[in-house]
Image (spheres, rainbow, N blue to C red):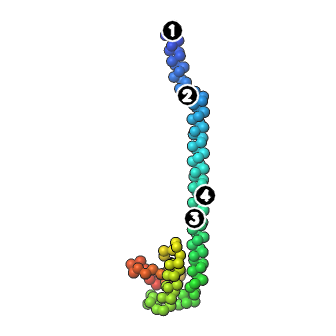
Amino acid sequence: MRLGEDKTNIKKGKNRRFNLQTKLGFSFSILTIATSAMLTIVLYQTVRGRLREDIRRHLYDIVNISALQVDGDTHATLIEPAQEGNTTYMYIKRILQNIRDKGTDIRYIYTWRRNADGQLIFVVDAETDPEEISHLGD
């Protein structure tokens, strides 16, 4: 009979791999990891949205301040690529270059306008590198 009792005890031991304390600890760990993951995702999405909104607001401020510096009537006279080197074009270009140079986060600054077909075209670009400049009418 001792053999039968030993087999029964061995079977009971195999079925009870984890005691209640281990199961509760494991469940608590899974719950904690899941909660931390969800909170991390929510925090990431919130910070990401806030940063995008701050960048959008910063760019909007730059555009509004820049628009006050450039005379719209003078800008409207620039319609043909041949005008690219004239005094009006160079005056506006210098204004844009000054804005770019004074700003810490501004690398590219240029003006656009809609043409008769409704397409956006470049008018004045503050770029000085001939390989990267966008010409009037591009």
- Residue appearing at x 44%, y 83% in the figure: 135
Earlier-in-chain disc, 3 versus 1: 1
Q: Nearer the viewer, residue 75 or 137?
A: 75
Kind of element beneath mark 1: helix
Q: CA distance from mark 1 to mark 2?
A: 26 Å
Question: x%, y% of residue 79?
Answer: 50, 88
Q: Hey, what amino acid is under mark 3?
A: Arg
Q: Hey, what amino acid is under mark 4?
A: Thr
Location of mark 2 (residue): 18
Q: CA distance from mark 3 to mark 2?
A: 49 Å
Location of mark 1 (residue): 2
Q: CA distance from mark 1 to mark 4?
A: 66 Å
Earlier-in-chain disc, 1 versus 2: 1
Earlier-in-chain disc, 4 versus 2: 2
Image quarter where the C terminus lies is bottom left
Location of mark 3 (residue): 52
- Residue appearing at x 45%, y 88% in the figure: 84
Q: How many marks?
A: 4
Earlier-in-chain disc, 1 versus 4: 1
Q: Are marks 4 and 3 in contact (CB under 8 Å)?
A: no
Q: Nearer the viewer, residue 114 or 124?
A: 124
Q: Residue 46 has which mark? A: 4
Q: CA distance from mark 4 to mark 2?
A: 40 Å
